[in-house]
């Protein structure tokens, strides 16, 4: 590889285990938040790699349905992730393999970047993620040039991933600021857990029942925040079928003709429209946050998504009864109401009609996000 050749990285989904703690069910194919865990991992890792492979020893046709090459390791009795890694090494031309497990649906969007930077700056052979508490050996960046070393290791009867990794110069890469990216689903109860939203930019939601006035409040808050030179992005959940395009427009005709995605761009604005083929799967907040260009954003405000785990203000109108969402959601940090009476079990109560006071609270929230 010359000094000017681009470094190529193949993503590898490791799905070759026996899933004993999940009763033998294939963990990568189990549903998590409306779709399979493997689907979550693939969506998160694809933007970070040049091509993608799946290492699997069972349910081959199901994994092929993702439309990426499925490679079996050819060894009996589930020999572990190293066997799958070697099988992929034998069939690709990339410089590196970026490995991720099928049972970790939350993947850092900086996984490749951090591992590759650490590997290159330290001159190490292999880069491995560390969550601040323990090493995560299956989140590794491994050069294909170590294929013969791995072949010899497995031929000797050894199988432990850590033992082979540390035969080489390894750099442990700090992901302690993203420790929740290593949630590892092992039991049926784990499937029900909602991960905490991850974002370098402060994220604050407004949760309420329909008719409480979330949008009305946002249209008052956003100009007031802008006057404080706080640049805001907004993500809104729609509970019904909606369309931002109009019949008769060129873009509408193109979409109706069958285009899966359309980008409309001008000097002042850009819009992306993507069709969802399964209308039963609700959108998730984390992938939407990752789509934002946050280079000039100080705050992400969210309307809806009240069942996800991120800081929120519950909106309340006295005419609709007392606030209730905070009793079930520990992520509600304040209540904005037109009735400012508070009780010992309630979070801070803000006057929903006092926009300057709410802006001051949000400023303090932004300051505390990464402190």
Image (cartoon, rainbow, N blue to C red):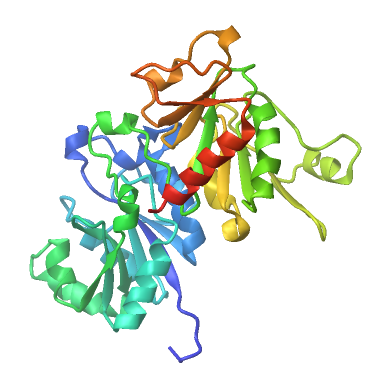
Give the quadrant of residue 282: top right
Q: Nearer the viewer, residue 29 or 7?
A: 7
Q: Is residue 31 above or below residue 107?
A: above
Residue at x 69% of width, y 34% of height: 220
Give the quadrant of residue 146: bottom left
| Residue 120 percent across, percent down from the top left | 35, 81
Check the image and name the residue furthest to the bottom.
Answer: 2
Residue at x 69% of width, y 27% of height: 216
In what quadrant of the picture does the N terminus appear? bottom left
Give the quadrant of residue 303: top right
Residue 325 in sight? yes
| Residue 352 percent across, percent down from the top left | 59, 25
Residue 284 in sight? no
Q: Is residue 63 left or right of residue 257?
A: left
| Residue 239 percent across, percent down from the top left | 62, 24
Residue at x 34% of width, y 19% of height: 345
Residue at x 83% of width, y 40% of height: 252
Q: Is residue 173 above or below residue 109?
A: below
Q: Nearer the viewer, residue 311 or 355?
A: 355
Check the image and name the residue furthest to the right.
Answer: 248
Check the image and name the residue furthest to the left.
Answer: 157
Q: Is residue 195 left or right of residue 291?
A: left
Q: Nearer the viewer, residue 235 or 155?
A: 235
Q: Is residue 160 above or below residue 366?
A: below
| Residue 177 percent across, percent down from the top left | 33, 56
Q: Nearer the viewer, residue 66 or 210?
A: 210
Total labels drawn: 0
């Amino acid at each position: 590889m010359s000094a000017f050749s681009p470094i190529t990285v193949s993503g590898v989904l490791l799905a070759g285990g026996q899933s004993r703690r999940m009763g033998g069910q294939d963990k990568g194919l189990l549903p998590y938040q409306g779709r399979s865990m493997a689907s979550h991992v693939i969506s998160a890792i694809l933007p970070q790699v040049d091509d993608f492979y799946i290492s699997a020893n069972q349910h081959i046709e199901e994994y092929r349905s993702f439309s990426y090459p499925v490679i079996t390791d050819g060894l009996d009795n589930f020999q572990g992730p190293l066997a799958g890694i070697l099988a992929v090494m034998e069939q690709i031309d990339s410089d590196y393999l970026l490995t991720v497990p099928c049972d970790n649906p939350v993947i850092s969007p900086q996984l490749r970047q951090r591992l590759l930077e650490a590997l290159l700056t330290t001159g190490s052979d292999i880069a491995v993620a560390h969550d601040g508490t323990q090493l995560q050996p299956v989140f590794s960046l491994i050069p294909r040039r170590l294929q013969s070393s791995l072949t010899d290791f497995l031929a000797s009867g050894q199988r432990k991933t850590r033992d082979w990794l540390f035969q080489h110069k390894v750099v442990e890469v700090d992901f302690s600021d993203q420790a929740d990216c290593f949630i590892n689903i092992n039991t049926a109860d784990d499937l029900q857990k909602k991960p905490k939203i991850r974002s370098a930019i402060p994220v604050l939601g407004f949760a309420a029942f329909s008719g409480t006035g979330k949008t009305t409040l946002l249209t008052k808050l956003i100009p007031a925040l802008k006057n404080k030179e706080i640049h805001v992005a907004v993500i809104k959940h729609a509970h019904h079928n909606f369309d931002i395009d109009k019949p008769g427009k060129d873009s509408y005709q193109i979409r109706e003709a069958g285009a899966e995605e359309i980008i409309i761009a001008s000097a002042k604005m850009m819009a992306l429209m993507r069709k969802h083929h399964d209308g039963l799967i609700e959108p998730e907040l984390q992938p939407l946050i990752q789509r934002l260009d946050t280079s000039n954003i100080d705050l992400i405000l969210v309307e809806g998504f009240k069942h996800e785990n991120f800081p929120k203000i519950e909106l309340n109108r006295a005419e609709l009864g007392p606030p209730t969402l905070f009793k079930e959601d520990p992520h509600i940090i304040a209540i904005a109401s037109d009735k400012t009476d508070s009780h010992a079990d309630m979070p801070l109560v803000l006057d929903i009609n006092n926009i300057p006071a709410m802006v001051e609270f949000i400023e303090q929230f932004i300051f505390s996000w990464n402190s």
